[in-house]
Image (cartoon, grey):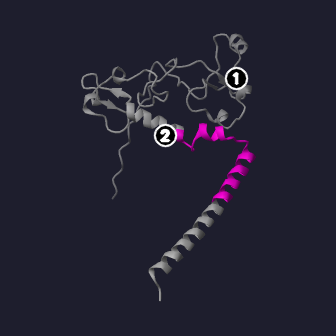
Amino acid sequence: MTTLSNIEERIRKLQARADAIQKKQAIAAVAKIHSLMKEHGLTIDDLISRGRVGAGKDSANAALAATGKYRDPKTGATWSGRGRAPAWIANAKNRARFLVSEAVESNDSDSGKRTGNYPRGPQPAKYRDPKSGAEWSGRGKAPGWLASVKDRTKFLISAADTKAAGTKKPKSKTNPTPARSTKAAKTPIAAKAPRAKRT
C-alpha cells in the first residue's frame, strides 16, 4: 500500500536526480561558453560591457522614451518623437523649439531637412565618357555608360582637361538640347481633287 511518506520519499529522490541532471547540463554549458570565449578572444569584461546583443540600442531607446525628445514648455509633457504626435506639437511647423536638447539623436530623418552644404541647380561635370563625350555631374542616378563600372577614376575629368577645353564643352548625350528654329516651316497645302462619281 502506498503511503504519504513513500510518495514524499520518491519526490525527494526524483528532485535529487533532477538537480544532478541540471548541474551536469550547467557544467556542459559553462564549458561551451569558455570554449567560445577562447575561440573568439573574449573576456568577462567584454561580456559585461557589451551585454546582450542590441542591449545598447534598447537602453538608448528606453532612455529616449523615458526622457522624451520633445517637451511642451507650458505643461511639461514630453513626446519621444515616435508614433502619433500629441496635440501640442502636431500642428507646429518648426518642432526644433520643442527639442529637449540639441544633441538628442544624430539620426534626424524625421525633420526632412538636408544637412550639409549641397548646392542646388545644375552642377559642373565630374565624369566624362571618352568614347561619346557624354558628361555626368556625379549627382543623381548614374548614366548607363558609368553605372556598371566599378572603378570610376578613369572617367574623372581633371582640372587640366577642363582648362584645355576652354569654354567649349562637348555636347552631353545625357541632356541633349534640341535645336529650335526661329521661323516655322511653311508648307503649301495641296488642294484635294474632287472624286469622280460612280455610275
Q: Which mark is residue 58?
A: 2
Q: Nearer the viewer, mark 2 or mark 1?
A: 2
Residue neighbourhood size for the residue with mark 2, other residues' Cα within 10 Å, grouped as few (<14), some (14–19), many (≥20): few
N-terminal label among 2 and 1: 2
Inspect the magenta stretch and tell me whether residue 38 lies in it.
Answer: yes
Residue at image position (38%, 23%) is: 100
Q: Which of the image's four quarters has the C terminus? A: bottom left
Residue 169 placed where, x, y %?
64, 17
Residue 166 placed where, x, y %?
67, 10
Residue 56 placed where, x, y %?
53, 37
Residue 157 placed where, x, y %?
69, 20
Span highlighted in magenta in the image: 26-55
- Taking the image as shown, residue 31 lies to the left or right of residue 93, namely right
- Taking the image as shown, residue 123 lies to the left or right of residue 187, namely right
Compared to residue 101, the image places residue 54 above or below, namely below
Q: Amino acid at mark 1?
A: Leu
Residue at image position (69%, 40%) is: 43
Q: Which residue is mark 1?
A: 156
Residue neighbourhood size for the residue with mark 1, other residues' Cα within 10 Å, grouped as few (<14), some (14–19), many (≥20): some
Q: Determine which quarter of the picture holds residue 138.
A: top right
Which sits in the foreground, 188 or 91?
91
Q: CA distance from mark 2 to mark 1?
A: 44 Å
Kindly report the secondary structure that dominates the magenta region of the rendered protein.
Answer: helix
Residue at image position (51%, 74%) is: 11
Q: Secondary structure at mark 2?
A: helix
